[in-house]
Image: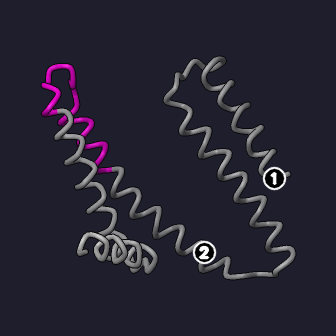
Amino acid sequence: MVSFLALAINIGFNWFFVFVMRWGHESLALTTSISASVNFVILYLAMRRYAGDFGTRDLLGLLVKLAGAGAAMAAVCLAADRFFFADPAQLPFWLRAGGLMATVAVAAGVYFAAARVLKVAEARDALDMVMRRLGR
């Protein structure tokens, strides 16, 4: 039932932001985030009701750390958008593609570096899995 509710919220917000607010297809990621957040909150509250408190304080601390790492990553993306991709029509395709790949790589590196500084164990574990896979 919660998934159906999240799906209805997603469809409703998609319609509202695209056709009423005229924000275009760019708003679709926002609506997906909104519906996923509503889905998470409802399921979390239901799980907490049945299982009791299972580390809410730790989860909130982790969320703050991840938001900090995400903000650092977003700063890289915004800087690239402002300075490198200010007028992408003037750049040849190969330079746009290379700039995009470099931006993604640098942003990911900044995210994982910030997560490491903030002592996010899950980010370290994910990076270790990727490094093991690339090492093969």
| Predominant SS of the magenta segment | helix
Q: Is residue 71 magenta?
A: no
Q: What quarter of the picture does the C terminus occupy?
A: bottom left
Q: Is residue 62 left or right of residue 19?
A: left
Q: Are marks 2 and 1 in contact (CB under 8 Å)?
A: no
Sequence-wise, which precedes: disc 2 or disc 1? Answer: 1
Residue 59 badge: 2
Query: In this rendering, is residue 16 above or below 35?
Result: above
Q: Quadrant of residue 108?
A: bottom left
Residue under the image location 39 percent in, 80 percent down: 119
Which kind of residue does numbered mark 1 sit on? Val
Residue under the image location 33 percent in, 58 percent down: 72
* Residue 22: image location, x then y, percent: 57, 18
Residue on which the image places disc 1: 2
Q: Quadrant of residue 55?
A: bottom right
Which segment did they paint magenta?
75-95
Which kind of residue does numbered mark 2 sit on? Leu
Badge 1 density bin: few <14, some 14–19, many ≥20, Cα 10 Å: few
* Residue 94: image location, x then y, percent: 14, 32
Q: Is residue 77 magenta?
A: yes
* Residue 16: image location, x then y, percent: 68, 25
2 vs 1, front mark: 1
